[in-house]
């Protein structure tokens, strides 16, 4: 049986096996696996030869990781999963999910950066500096799991922390990035350890004199209600939703409420929403991954669409396409830009776009321009 020290040594070896490792997979019936730049890779150690982990081996590792948190045993047995943060002795940190699968316990660990990266270090669009200067309202970062939403939010909070003497309060599941106070006072609370639900944590937050509140995820109507109330009373609220694109995000929020409350909730969203940032991570030409963004700013045109709903010729996509002066862009515009710079290939651009007809035409124009430029140079040299 593996000891705690041996488990930590094993996890350290997996985490630092090679550059680009983002996740560790410890699954019953499989060898050890890591995700490298978005691709799965099996790992075999000569001194720990495992072709396929047994249910007992994965259970020993899982239970060792939560032995100091008895409430997680209860959650794991009751709900079939448990989320928490985990640190090695060298302060390497992970976001961990243990889940049951056919009477076995399995572990997926997301490796976390020890240092909070800035907007500049991540290469985020310049508009993110403007987002960090907002004083109240709701800002949502959306996208599927593992697309870098938490990293983006951490960079924005870091920018606020550097420049503003405010109280930042975070509600996370689990705490991923540790924000050390610079100008701001920062309190980070973890679901399960410090509060029982996002709704309860957010309700308590309103009595803790925050200027800025980060809610790890809005999962239900109750949390959405309190977040809207916080924004309406002058707080700046950041959160995430597992949606893709601004239209889907607005529809998801409206969908939390019954039909007879749709008009009222649209008014509240229109009054409090500041930005929606959609995010995806795509394979980058030459290796690694690169983020692509969908950015909506709530100006007068967008506010009207939120209030009345989308219709032909009046869509959020149209508003974002034409909203460049306000810092807006669609996924499609960013995909075309990245393709033009040679950072992503045609296949990725077409696979992830929202309007294939528009992106396809733009890619054809870019290819045609490159061909003409190439032949023009060659003809000039021949002449």
Image (cartoon, grey):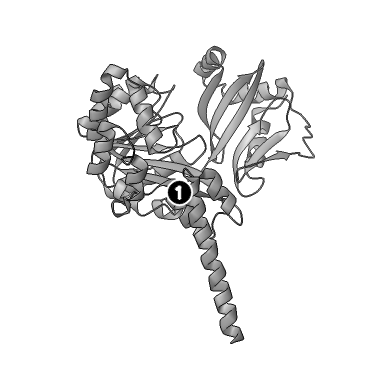
The residue that appears at 19% across and 30% down in the rendered structure is 233
Q: Is residue 367 above or below residue 189?
A: below
Camera-side residue of 358 and 255 = 358
x, y percent for residue 216: 40, 31
Task: Locate the N terminus and report the quarter of the image it occupies.
Answer: top right
Q: Position of residue 343 (x, y in %)?
A: 54, 57
Q: Is residue 320 visible?
A: yes
Tell me the quadrant of the picture where the C terminus can be found: bottom right
Q: Is residue 204 visible?
A: no
Other-residue count near label 1 (Cα within 10 Å), few / some / many at <14 / 14–19 / ≥20: many
Q: Is residue 20 left or right of residue 322?
A: right
Residue 140 on image: x %, y %? 36, 37
Q: Looking at the picture, how far across and down is residue 89, in whole percent?
A: 57, 37
The answer to which of 238 and 332 lies nearer the viewer is: 332
- Name the foreground residue: 159 vs 135: 135
- Is 261 placed left or right of 47 in the picture? left
Q: Residue at x 51, y 27 (%)?
A: 84
Which residue in the protein does label 1 denote? 332
Direction left: furthest residue: 233
């Amino acid at each position: 049986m593996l000891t705690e020290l041996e488990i930590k040594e094993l996890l350290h070896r997996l985490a630092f096996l090679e550059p680009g490792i983002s996740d560790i997979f410890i699954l019953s019936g499989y060898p050890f696996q890591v995700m490298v730049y978005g691709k799965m890779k099996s790992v075999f150690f000569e001194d720990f030869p495992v072709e396929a982990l047994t249910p007992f081996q994965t259970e020993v590792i899982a239970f060792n990781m939560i032995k100091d948190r008895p409430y997680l045993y209860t959650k794991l047995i009751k709900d079939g999963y448990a989320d928490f943060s985990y640190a090695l002795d060298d302060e390497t940190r992970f976001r961990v999910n243990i889940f049951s699968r056919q009477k076995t316990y399995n572990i997926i660990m997301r490796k976390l950066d020890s240092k909070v990266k800035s907007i500049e270090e991540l290469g985020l669009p310049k508009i993110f500096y403007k987002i960090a200067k907002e004083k109240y309202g709701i800002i949502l970062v959306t996208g599927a799991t593992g697309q870098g939403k938490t990293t983006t939010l951490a960079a924005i909070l870091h920018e606020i922390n550097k420049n503003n003497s405010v109280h930042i309060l975070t509600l996370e599941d689990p705490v991923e990035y540790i924000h050390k106070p610079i100008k701001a006072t920062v309190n980070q609370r973890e679901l399960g350890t410090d509060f029982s639900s996002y709704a309860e944590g957010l309700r308590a937050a309103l009595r803790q004199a925050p200027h800025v509140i980060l809610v790890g995820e809005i999962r239900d109507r109750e949390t959405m209600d309190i977040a809207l109330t916080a924004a309406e009373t002058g707080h700046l609220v950041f959160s995430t939703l597992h949606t893709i694109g601004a239209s889907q995000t607005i529809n998801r929020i409206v969908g939390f409420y019954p039909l007879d409350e749709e008009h009222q909730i649209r008014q509240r969203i229109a009054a409090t929403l500041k930005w929606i940032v959609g995010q995806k991570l795509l394979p980058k030409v030459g290796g690694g991954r690169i983020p692509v963004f969908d950015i909506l700013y709530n100006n007068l045109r967008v506010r009207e669409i939120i209030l009345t709903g989308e219709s032909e010729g009046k869509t959020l996509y149209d508003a974002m396409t034409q909203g460049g002066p306000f810092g807006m862009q669609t996924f499609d515009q960013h995909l075309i830009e990245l393709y033009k710079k040679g950072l992503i290939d045609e296949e990725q651009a077409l696979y992830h776009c929202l309007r294939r007809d528009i992106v396809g035409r733009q890619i054809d124009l870019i290819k045609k321009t490159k061909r003409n430029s190439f032949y023009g140079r060659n003809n000039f040299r021949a002449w």
